[in-house]
Amino acid sequence: MNKKNIIIIGATSGIGKSLFERYAADGNRIGIVGRRTHLLDELRQEHPDTTFTATADITKLDEIARAIDALRDELKDIDLAIVCSGTGDINASLDYAVERPTIETNVMGWTFVIDTLYHIFEQQGHGHLVAITSAGGLRGEPMAPAYSASKAYQINYMEALRKKAYKSGNHICVTDIRPGLVDTAMAKGEGLFWVMPVEIVASQIIAAIRRKKTKAYVTKRWHFLALINKNLPFTLYKML
Ligand SMILES: NC(=O)c1ccc[n+]([C@@H]2O[C@H](COP(=O)([O-])OP(=O)(O)OC[C@H]3O[C@@H](n4cnc5c(N)ncnc54)[C@H](OP(=O)(O)O)[C@@H]3O)[C@@H](O)[C@H]2O)c1
């Protein structure tokens, strides 16, 4: 398999970390970003010759711009960029202080990161842009309104970029990965079901990326649930 130059934004834990471990074990050169420097350093120690790190908070635009520049200096050409960074909290009481970081991270910071990476791929003339959105972005969720709305935003944004890439005829591939529940720190709340192991989720994400899918639900059983959820009339959805 050809070795790739990869950037993973949000690689310190959960899905991003699992993707890092899989791609790094295959000998790819990887630049990783997150706020927790000590976790980035631990990952670099696993594959010191092929791992590059940059600490950044995606809500601080200067910081994340510098981080992506620094990784680009190391990697030169970037084949694949995966944006995993995200946050969200249960907020049934509609406390704005809880919604705000979700909007700042999943909408404002995320958009800056996605646009920056897309521009790099335009300059290069090629590249594969992947975002981890969520099956939770298909419907409004009263327990986490900003989270579900932010993921709907991301889903539409990725579709916009996919159409833009098609119209401009450039060689940029845009993939939207929509996980169901995954066993990471992000899976919050009571009575969660079908919570999938992160390793299985990472395997299916890597397979979808390899096939250059436009979008993929992971795991596959969540595709089934997503289709039902998406098409359920509101008169039924409101009772769940
Ligand atoms: N777990 C699920 O059930 C589930 C389901 C659907 C979609 N997703 C999505 O999957 C993605 C990854 O989440 P996860 O489940 O792997 O949870 P996680 O373990 O909490 O990972 C979140 C990652 O995002 C990074 N991050 C958060 N805020 C950031 C910020 N301001 N700047 C830079 N990086 C930031 C974190 O790194 P630092 O803390 O080091 O910055 C961490 O690496 C998220 O976008 C999430 O919405 C998760």
Image (cartoon, helix red, strand yellow):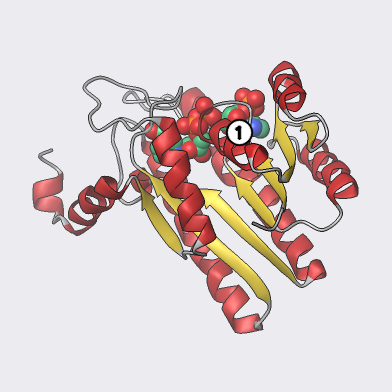
Q: Which residue occupies 44% across, 27% down? A: 186
Q: Position of residue 238 (x, y in %)?
A: 14, 43
The answer to whether 87 appears left or right of 217 in the picture is: right
Q: Amino acid at mark 1?
A: Glu
Structural crowding at the residue carrying mark 1, measured as other residues with C-alpha within 10 Å and reported as few (<14), some (14–19) or many (≥20)? some
Q: On the picture, is 149 further left or further right than 55?
A: left
Q: Is residue 100 visible?
A: no
Residue under the image location 73 percent in, 42 percent down: 30
Picture quarter containing residue 201?
top left
Q: Is residue 16 left or right of residue 67?
A: left
> Of 161 and 100, which appears nearest the observer?
161
Quadrant the N terminus occupies = bottom right
Q: Where does residue 175 sit, x and y in percent of width and height?
A: 52, 60
The residue pinned by badge 1 equals: 21
| Res 143 visible | yes
**In-front residue for pair 114/147:** 114
Across and down, in percent, residue 65 comes to 81, 44
Q: Quadrant of residue 230?
A: bottom left
